[in-house]
Image (cartoon, grey):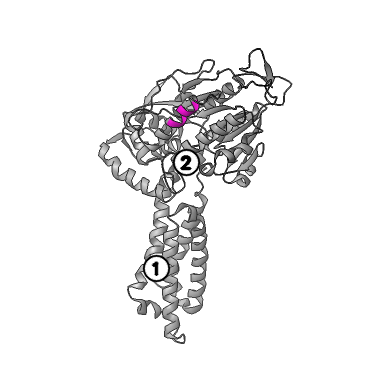
Amino acid sequence: MNCRCDCPGTVCSAKSACPPGQHCRCSVFVVDPYDRGMKILILGATGFIGSAILQRLAADGHRITGLGRDPGKARLKWPAAAWLKADLAKLSADAWRPLIEDQDIIVNCAGALQDGLADDLAATQEKAMLSLYEAARALGGRRIVQISARTDGAAGSLPFLATKRRADKALAASGLPFVILRPALVIGRNAHGGTALLRSLASFPGLLPLIHGESPVETVSLRDVAAAVSLAIDGTIPAGSDLDLAAEQTLTLSDLVQQHRSWLGLPAVRVVELPAPLARPVAWAADLAGRLGWRSPLRSTAMTVMSEGVRSSRPRPGGLAFADATQTLAAHPSGVQDLWFARLYLLKPAIILTLSLFWLLSGLIPLLDVSAAAAHFPPAMPATLALSTTVATCILDILLGSAVLVRPHARKAMLGMILTSLAYLAGGTILEPQLWLDPLGVLVKVLPSIALTLVALAILDER
């Protein structure tokens, strides 16, 4: 693998040093067919876009390393790549150097929509990138392919786009060879974020309630995003490029959702255009969920972006024909599992909230009259023990009902709910077996609660 360098009259390999007293910065890459491929580090390699880029570059013959918080899990799903464990929010320039010193190119697909329990935009999208550029310069330069977004417009001042804009400007001014790619709304076979929301809205029964339904939306297929990165890697897209990735077709949000509805095999229905102010309580609830670690695509940042639509303003890369939304969906026919996903995506928040309320109320209501609740224990049990056991189980229920709302604790809370439910069933069967015949179904009702918890566990993962 060779690169033409800025050293006058010099062509050097990506690993060799410049002549004494000169500094090399690779700007045009020429692929050697006998080379085993470049070493490429992908940030955000487990994400919706990053995983597709990983697969494309691996198929191109490059040697891929992914960076993530859980490399063990990633390695099981994408064994073709090597994996490094790191938290972008905590990487200084010194911490970056050993991660990139053996890499030829860094592809940055990392990012988040909004600050929350699991995301710090300033740390991951700006500070970490500035440290990366510093480390790359100290090592003599590395080409950086950055997946960004349109950073102006109504949402331009929000942290999501403001941090990306500052990182993009710093990259352009860094002296490093770079390519910045700005995809429109990305549509792929899999779904995450905005794509998942489109599918879930399309599955809405009977009608389509939409806010900003007339906003214009440009799309790009996930496959074309990965192809553009491949062109940036092999030098077809030259260093210094800052390009939009979007098909020529522009649809309204309403038309795009209807297309997804048809793709799911559902008949067209009437669109009900909701007034824009209704977005505020929805966004407020989604923002609150974000503070608890849930990455809802309905947060205020997404609502602000969609208020004016998704449009491109920069040149598009040559040599690449972009598939529009119609072509992208037609190339990947849906299956029944896609319809299940779409419907469950809408139901997931309701399932989590139902579980939380069930356990919170089951813990709080007995505390209104602890003595009456403790009376269910056998007369042979000392009153103080019965009372303390009642209070302890109430506290346990409240803790489980609260913990399931916090995304990092949700899985453990659900497992705790199942184990606690089984313990309650066993204890109730031993102490008061007649409760199985109670007309109100005191014990019988625990069984659907366990089933709902199993459903929640099954759909908990987001990527």
**Numbered disc 2: secondary structure:** helix
Which residue is disc 1 drawn over? 363
Question: Please, what secondary structure does the residue beneath circle 1 have?
Answer: helix
Above or below, 159 relative to 245: below
Can residue 377 be seen at all in this image of the molecule? no
Query: Magenta part mainly helix, strand or loop?
Result: helix
Residue in the foreground of this view, choosing between 289 and 462:
289
Q: Return the mark for residue 123.
A: 2
Q: Is residue 214 left or right of residue 446?
A: left
Residue 314, quarter of picture? top left
Considering every residue shown, the one lying at the far top of the view is 9
> Which residue corresponds to the image point at 41% horizontal and 80% vertical from the top-left?
387
Q: Where are the magenta residues, as a range?
A: 166-171
Residue extending furthest toward the right: 34
Nearer to me, 373 or 307: 307
Give the image location of residue 408, x and y in percent.
49, 53
Q: At 41% across and 65% down in the image, what residue appears?
A: 398
* Left/right of residue 427 with respect to residue 280 in the rendered view: right
What is the C-alpha distance between the residues marked 1 and 2? 39 Å
Q: Which mark is residue 235?
A: none
Which amino acid does the dot numbered 2 rest on? Ala
Q: Front-most of 449 and 417?
A: 417
Q: Which image quadrant: the N terminus? A: top right
Q: Is residue 304 visible?
A: yes
- Magenta stretch encompasses residue 363: no
